[in-house]
Amino acid sequence: MCRVQTYISKLNDPWTNLAFEEWLFRNSDPETYILLLYRNTKSVIIGRNQNPWKECNLKLLAKDGVPFVRRKSGGGTVYHDMGNTNYSIMMPRAVFDRRTNVELICRALHELDIPALVNERHDIVLDGKKISNSLSKRKRGLHRAYHHGTMLIDSDLSTLGQYLKNNKEGLVTKGVASVRSPVTRLRESSFTVDHLSFSDATRTEFLKRYAYDQWRQNEEGEAIIVDDALIETLPAVQAVRDEMKTWDWMFGQTPEFTHTLEHEFSWGSVVAKINAKEGKIVRADIDSSEATGFGSPSLALTALGIGMEGQRYDQDGLDEAVERVKYEAPEVLAPAGGAKRIKDVVQWLKEEM
């Protein structure tokens, strides 16, 4: 007989839910089968090894007050809102099979009269479009594995598209890139499906698959509720949540990348090539054509590039670079409009970042 537990979170904070999921994966009994269901408020969730500047529209997210969260697992970028339900199925690593779990979710949808299918890539699709993004994680030392994913029930798909749209073609990253696919939502096939009905159907199919005898005899017990009171008793979850909000985790975890940009100013054209690692600029070459010909950058822009090295790849980092130039090389600011060139280039780079 399998040992099973089911959890339903009443919290909608993305950092808390993702931190609890990670804690549960690492601290639960390796032989126990677990289902966790939760929803988050508007947020963009990126994978552990992804580049936020490449994966999402950070400027629009900041304007709308929508956070991005880097989760502890790998995989691609997804959008969460209250029209989306997240599921996580954990079990012993030795018996883990991804297709078994996506078929379980698919059966739950069939119980709701939604004709979903599992394709050859183990995606759950409806009318040929994805309704669920999912990934699996295996931890050899823990002898555990889990499969977690989203279910687009009534999500705002237009907002999803805007937040995940990025036109930074000159940004080349060593991180994992998301693969975009056409998506739809369950609402297009059902007027009645919602978070509660999907959660109930998924919990039922989970119990039928991994604890059939208990389910048949109504002995499976109640779901464990995840709320503020429970989180208060789990300082380890609070610690993970706090870590996930730090700059070092959100941006400092970013793999190495190169961003090449070009712009035409009134005083000349500029090409900037910025190499960054762990969210900080390793090297910045800023080349200007000006009147002396391409390949002869002004001293001011050369100094700016040097000043950018070691700074964070963000607007504050650019401000720090300017202060460094003022302190270490003030002589480049006065002649031939050096200060204006730096001001123009910094403003341009801030807009691009």
Image (cartoon, grey):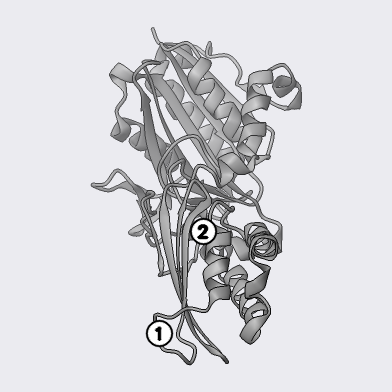
Mark 1 vs 2, N-terminal side: 2
The residue shown at (68%, 40%) is 12
The residue shown at (39%, 80%) is 295
Helix, strand or loop at mark 2? helix
On the rendered structure, is 74 left or right of 190?
left
Q: Confirm whether residue 107 shows in the render.
A: no
Question: Alpha-carbon neighbours of circle 2 within 10 Å: few (<14), some, or many (≥20)?
Answer: many
Q: Residue furthest top?
A: 1
The residue shown at (47%, 78%) is 297
Residue 114 appears at what percent x and percent y?
A: 43, 49
Q: Quadrant of the N terminus?
A: top left
Q: Quadrant of the C terminus?
A: bottom right
Query: Closer to the camera, 69 or 36?
Result: 69
Q: Residue furthest front?
A: 331
Instruction: Say which residue label 1 marks.
Output: 294
CA distance for labels 1 and 2: 29 Å
Residue 325 appears at what percent x and percent y?
A: 64, 64
Kind of residue sitting beneath label 1: Phe
Kind of residue sitting beneath label 2: Trp
Instruction: Say which residue label 2 marks.
Output: 53
